[in-house]
Each structure stands twice: as C-alpha cells, then as structure tokens.
Amino acid sequence: MTIPNITLRDGTTIPQLGFGIWNVPPETTANVVSNALQTGYRLIDGAYIYRNEQGLGEGIRASGIPRGEVYITTKVWNKDHGKDNTRISVKRSLKTIGVDQLDLVLIHWPVPSQDLYVETWQTLIKLRDEGLIKSIGVSNFNEDHLDRIIRETGETPVVNQIEVHPKLQQEHTRFANAKHGILTQAWTPLGKGQSFDADPITTAAKRTGKTPAQVILRWHIQLGHIVFPRSVSPERQAENINIFDFLLTDDEMTAIKSLDIGLRTGPDPSVFKLT
Ligand code: NAD
C-alpha cells in the first residue's frame, strides 16, 4: 500500500497518513510502533506529554526501517512554553527519541492565558534554523493565534493540527489554515467512533465494501487532511492504511458534510490551559 507524500509550504514532504501514539502505554510503544512501520506506516505522531518518546525511538530502530524513511513528529507541551523551556524541551525529545533531527515539532496548545506562544514560536524558528528540526508547525491554534504568530514573526507554520472528524468539521479554522497555505492535520480523525453508524458513512461503506473507519479516513484524505489514526491492534493498523484503492463520490462527500454538529471530544483551545 503506497501512502502519498504531500509537499508542505517549506518545500519538504510528509506522508499524508501516519500513526498516532497518544495513549499508547510506554511499555508497549516500541512494539506498536515497530509493527506500524512494518505494516507500511512512515509517519509517527508523538508528543512529549504522551510519555512514550523513548518507545517511539526504540520502535523505529527495532523495525529495521532506515531512520531517513520515517517521519517523526513531536510537540512542545504547555509548561515548556517560553524561550529557555522550549529549547530544553526540544533537546530532551531529541535525546529521548535518540535522533539528531526531528522532522516536525509543533506547539501542542496555544494556552493564550499564559501568553507565551509567540516566544515559543520564535524559539522553534531558531531551532529549525540551527538544524535541530526540519519543519515547524502548531496544534490547536485558532485563527487569531495563527494571525498573531505570523504577524509578529513573519514565519508561517507548515501545519496546524486540530480536532477534525465528521461531527466536528472545523470549517472556519480549516479555511484559515488554507488561506495561509497551512495544511490541516486532523487529530482524533475517527471521532471516537461516534459517526460509524451514521447513514452517510454506512451507505458509502456498503457501496465501496469498506469499513466505516476506512470511509471516514478516506473522507479526510479527499479533503486534503493529514491523518494519523491510532490502534494498538495489527488488524486495525492494516485496515486504517488500506484506503488508497477507492474514491468517495462528490455526493458521498456532501452527505458526510451534513454530519457536522460542532461536537468536540477534546478541549476548546481558546481556554485550555492544563500544564
Ligand atoms: P483516533 O481517531 O485515531 O481513534 C482511536 C480510537 O479508535 C482507538 O480507541 C482505537 O482503538 C479506535 N480505532 C482505531 N482504528 C479503528 C478501526 N479501524 N475501527 C474501529 N475503531 C478503531 O483517535 P486519537 O488517538 O485520539 O487521535 C489520533 C492521533 O492524533 C493521536 O494518537 C495523537 O497522535 C493525535 N492527537 C493529537 C492531539 C493534539 O492535541 N494535537 C489530541 C489528540 C490526539
């Protein structure tokens, strides 16, 4: 199964589908990551706060897939905002994962109440220029947060990773991303299974002979999103990657659009401040 690569605004490329490791227990992460890579995944979406960066690195090394073929994302956690802490956080992630360079580092949440995300962004720009990171982006940024970092630093993130699934389609933020040439990464792309039994999903699944999860992931791909579904089961890992041999019709895409009810499964970025 060949996963398409897409080009980011900084000219680098990223696989459009990868594997997320939020909530994967640290002690099993190496096995899960290694299996995902052997199944064909080439992007691992991690974060310092997931507490499994060591397993991420071990899994890559155990898989036998050369480092250069694997795209590693990690994220700077809320308590690590600010000039010094961001630098410490990125260096710690490099060491824990056991690599010389990270492919993509994101600011995990803007935490507007602590008002350090611009300084954090300036530090990521420096670390990228020093060669410790290939590309830099953000996560859970609303339009006003994006506008502010771009205005104050002149540097536009390559991606904005936000919660998107059929019940929370986030058109406003996706359009804000597109306006700046920022690609949308969709977290919790399966939406906790909440639309698996919705008519537009089951009808498309029946027509294509695919599962509801595959239909939803395909919907993301056709919208141009980057996705990284998570599953510790090898069967589901294989199922979720097997979405590049069918197409949803325009009518099916429109029917899925009607499922949007603005239902978040996670926190609202304008107020989230957990450290
Ligand atoms: P997901 O949408 O990937 O769903 C995972 C859940 O769906 C698991 O319970 C899994 O068992 C189940 N599942 C997986 N494949 C399935 C299938 N084929 N059929 C039925 N059920 C299936 O949710 P997620 O893990 O929350 O999100 C994916 C990734 O996004 C995370 O692992 C993480 O990397 C990232 N993420 C980022 C943020 C952020 O703030 N930036 C927040 C949450 C998640």
Image (cartoon, helix red, strand yellow):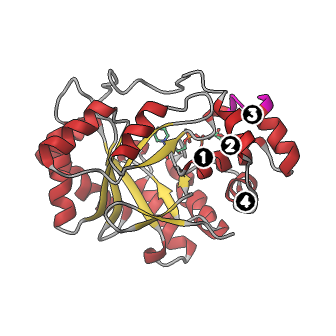
209 in magenta? no
Name the quadrant of the C terminus: top left
Q: CA distance from mark 4 to mark 1?
A: 14 Å
The numbered mark at residue 242 is 4
**Residues at marks 1 and 2 touching, judged by CB atoms closer than 8 Å:** yes
Q: CA distance from mark 3 to mark 4?
A: 17 Å
Region of the chain picked out in magenta, as a range: 193-199
Magenta segment's dominant SS is: loop
Residue 47 sits above or below residue 201 on the image: below
Where is mark 2, residue-wise?
216
Which residue type carries mark 1? His
Residue 165 sits above or below residue 22 on the image: above
Where is mark 1, residue-wise?
220
Which quarter of the figure has residue 242? bottom right
Where is mark 3, residue-wise?
196
- Asked which secondary structure carries label 3, the reply is loop
194 in magenta? yes
Which quarter of the figure has residue 68? bottom left
Residue 275 sits above or below residue 86 on the image: above
